[in-house]
Amino acid sequence: MDIEQILTRLAIALGIGLLFGLERGWKTRAATPGTRAAGIRTFAISGLLGGMVSALAQATGNPVSAGLVLGFGFAVFAGVITVFERDAERAAGSYSATTIIAALLTFVLGAYALVGDMRVAAAVAVGATGILAAREDIHRWVARITWPELRSALVLLAMTFVILPVVPDTAIGPYGGVNPREVWVIAIVLAAVSFLGYGTVRMFGAERGVLLASLAGGLVSSTAVTLTSARRTAAGEGEPHLLAAGVAVATAVSFVRVIAIVAVIKPPLLSLLAPVLAVAILAAVLYALIALYRFQVVDAGAGPPANFTNPFSLWPVIGFAVFLGIIILLGRMVGETFGARGALIGAAAVGLADVDSITVSMARLVPQPLDTLGAGSAILAAVASNMLSKLAIAAAIGRRAFAMQTAIMTVTCWLAALVALWATLLVSSG
């Protein structure tokens, strides 16, 4: 390492110390001079000290002696800063280890800036300083969080970062089988959409929270939005008209998602699909506006329309994910049994659980073995059957009012799409 590299890395170490010191100094800016154990100057020098100790360790040229120098330097620094900060805390009558930990991290990052990736050291410093600066916000958030919220967040994190990496990524069973990893991803999506809806309602209120969560959830899975909304109504946690409006928004987003997938993979299919789905989108959005207006006018005096108490329940989510996996397997069996002529039947069967995979697979079969009309019809069949499955979810799980509202939205979209399909085929044939 040449002199320019050393100086550059030492400058990073100094900058890390200044960053920590600026935040710590601002927190104690009202304190009387001489009563603080560590301020902006101490933290700046601590970062530089870590860099210099690391440079001295490297200069020994021996891994063992370098480790001893670095370890001894850190131990001495930790002892000194701990003693002084302890005395400062006692004098102030407070009790906190934050400044000590921040000082130790400053030294470590300063040392790492000399021997490791400077970008990593700088990024960790910025992240840690952000956490320190958000102290009040974090404390307020912790004070407001409930045990079901914390438990659900931990379960969702465990599902994503602990269990998902070890779930087998190999299909099991006949006809292409079912991939356990894909089923588990479905469970994560269902749980995440439910948690998202809970969080947005808590943050933005019932009306905006439900609609924002439905908009975001529809980008991933409108089926998950429907399942979550149905469970909310069954538990008496939401106004059926408002939650039905959310399902309509998610459904409209799912139509947009299909158009986007086709536009990327096979643009010629848009001549058939775009007009039909555009009309269906318009119908879903109009229904959402009407349902929202009814919620505001008719139910304005009914009290708080949504009081979500639990982000999601684990076992129902897993059970429904397994059910969707079985539906996908059955759809593949139907498709392979009937061959190319059964593409429409297979698409409708798989569409009960997943539209995106059918959209991708059918689009890739154009122009052979399927023509534009055959592939487009299969995709529309999948979209229609997916809406049917959402209607079944609403009827089986949700309250009667929610099921009726979902049925009205579904039939409206079907009729609008059929009229648009008839007009499109008429124009294309003429």
Image (tube, rainbow, N blue to C red):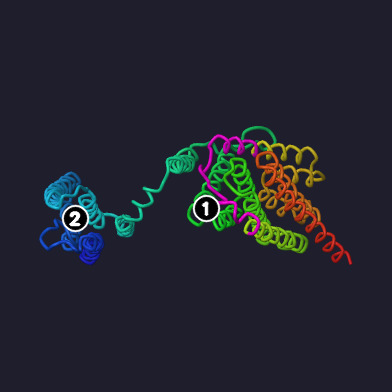
The kind of residue tagged 2 is: Gly
x%, y% of residue 136?
A: 32, 55
Q: Is residue 13 left or right of residue 216?
A: left
- What are the residue bounds of the magenta stretch? 297-324
The residue positioned farthest toward the top in the image shown = 173
Report if residue 298 lies within the magenta region: yes
The quadrant in which the N terminus is found is bottom left
Tell me which amino acid carries mark 1: Val
Residue 5 visible in the current orientation:
no
427 relative position to 127: left or right: right
- Report the residue at 13% width, 47% height from top: 79
Residue occupied by mark 2? 50
Q: Would you call the spot at circle 1 few (<14 residues within 10 Å), some (14-19), or many (20 or more)?
A: many
**How far is mark 1 from mark 2, CA to CA?**
46 Å
Q: Residues within 10 Å of mark 2 (few under 14, many from 20)?
A: many
Does residue 11 show up? yes
Q: Is residue 317 found inside the magenta-colored segment of the image?
A: yes
Quarter holding the C terminus is bottom right
> x, y percentage for residue 115?
25, 55
Residue indicated by mark 1 = 201
